[in-house]
Amino acid sequence: MSLEVFSELFEPADVHVARRLTAMANESDESVALAVAIAVRALRGGSVCVDLRSIAEQLEMPELPWPSPDDWLAAVRASPLVTDTPVLRLFGDLLYLDRYWLEEQQVCDDVLTLLSSTLPGEVPGLERLFPAGWEEQRAAAEIALTQSLTVLTGGPGTGKTTTVARLLALLAEQASLSGRPPLRIALAAPTGKAAARLLEAVQLEVGRLDAVDRDRLPELKASTLHRLLRSRPGNSSRFRHHRENRLPHDVIVVDETSMVSLTLMARLLEALRPDSRLLLVGDPDQLASVEAGAVLADMVDGLGERSDVRIAALTTSHRFGESIGALASAIRTGDVDDVVALLRAGGDHIEWVETDDPGEQLRKVLLPHALRLREAAILGDVKAALSTLDEHRLLCAHRRGPYGVRFWNHQVERWLTDATGEPLWTQWYAGRPVLVTANDYGLNLYNGDTGVTVVRGDGLRAVVAAGKGPIEFATGRLSDVETMHAMTIHKSQGSQADEVTVLMPPEDSRLLTRELFYTAVTRAKEKIRIIGAEASVRAAVQRRAVRASGLAQRLRAT
């Protein structure tokens, strides 16, 4: 068996790493080189390890000359890459590169250490802050009061942010009654946009509290996890806060935890003080981090089976109409026949357009929306322009190709030219919807912020929606932006629009998964429109975005 026989599986970098490591260890067994290449390849797909016994089935390539699983594992266990210099690690049948094995074990150890710490007792304000009708949120708060680490899960509109804000008020009351100094609280998220949205939502809920509860809370601030931990220049995985220089906060809330990678979670946990509280908030059914790991889902699976730990789960959504909620639930549980039935039933909130040629259907939706944006922009009506922007989103799985964001952004611009008779000579034009693609702390702009180009007396200005109100910029100051007549489902995570259209790619698209479909559908507040064939819908519901990991198993077993 030669590694080259499997060349269709790998990028050149996978093979290079495998060849380099086996040469350094004087390892001549080609099956070990194959295992290394597979482990490196797995990281690109978000897996932190690989199960050598089932890899042929996972990759749906049984025709390749795979080694016998028993012989393969025996060869890896006997390899100098395992026995001498631990470049590779095994956890049962799971094969890791050393770094990810260590990070996974560290996350497990730190999670269980946090959960073992003792906490103060009950707080008098529980019934006051979570009155009748708030039973789910009150139960979640009760769990969070008894655990140093709490996983708070729930889909869109289930009240996660409301629970967070009122829980912070409870903890502040607890500190006040015990005579302790005011709490030091940090709000954080994986992206700047998510952090800004968390702060805005928490502040809105805090504003509804009684004055005495508001006064107990410090001024709340939010940041990205990287900024909270204080990144080191030139090193994306190490920070200024670590085990020897802990974070000063008493309470840390992390939103959109499904987007947090294994490495980032390891860095956060090692930087926590032993007596601090950590609240991890998110929806484990949404898309996971673009980097390796699915930490939130692993914690829910692993900790959820322990008798000494409770997951705080919110299940009742207050955002959707009944039909969109039912569709999201059917997707989440993988009930493909129910999904198809709900789409066929349609109604005021669900529309399904079964077609392999989406052009004309999308034109009917996208062109009127683009023309309304243009009209508001030409009039200089910022409020109307931003409101119109949030009326509709076209979501695509791909960036390129006939089902991708770039194609449809250009197509809408061509339609605009045809409809108005005014060619778009530059990338900046009145009514151009924009998506910020990188954080700029100097401008208070965050990756994921959205805006519209409007006409002012001195020319075009880009107006970006922000938590404290719209911010205007000269277009020349914005370099990290792209047109947003369409956006990827990944980029839409955490946002919402009144009406959402999802363009389904062909059924053989590797990006088409249940998690992607669920994330797309739950971006809609009032109406969801699916454009695509039944085969694509069925493929999306049936295909899971499986990420190999041993974290849930470690958490269960320890």
Image: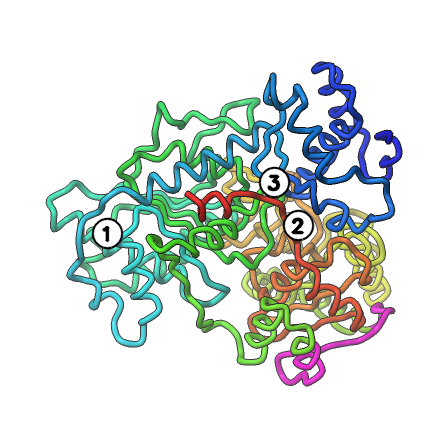
How many marks on residues? 3
- How far is mark 3 from mark 2, CA to CA? 41 Å
Q: Which residue is mark 1?
A: 171
* Mark nearer the N terminus (1 vs 2): 1
| Residue drawn at point x = 24 percent, y = 50 percent | 217
Residue type for callout 1: Leu
Sequence-first tag of 3 and 2? 3
Dot label at residue 292: 3
Q: CA distance from mark 1 to mark 2?
A: 48 Å
Q: Residue at x 55, y 38 (%)?
A: 440
Q: Which residue is mark 2?
A: 460
The C terminus sits in image quarter: top left
Q: For the point 35% across and 45% down, which residue is it?
A: 278
Is residue 543 covered in magenta?
no
Asked whether residue 382 is in view, the answer is yes
Q: Which residues are magenta?
A: 340-360
For disc 2, the neighbor class at 10 Å (few under 14, some 14 to 19, many from 20) is many
- Percent coordinates x, y for residue 356 in the rendering: 86, 69
Mark found first going from the N terminus, 3 or 1: 1
- Secondary structure under tag 3 reads loop
Q: Amino acid at mark 3?
A: Ala
Quadrant housing the N terminus = top right
Tell me where residue 555 appears, x and y as whole percent.
45, 45
Report x, y in % for residue 419.
83, 67
User: Residue 470: image x %, image y %?
Assistant: 51, 54
**Residue 485 visible, this angle:** no
User: The residue tagged with tag 1: helix, strand or loop?
Assistant: helix
- Height in image: 333 above or below 423? below
Residue type at the position of mark 2: Leu
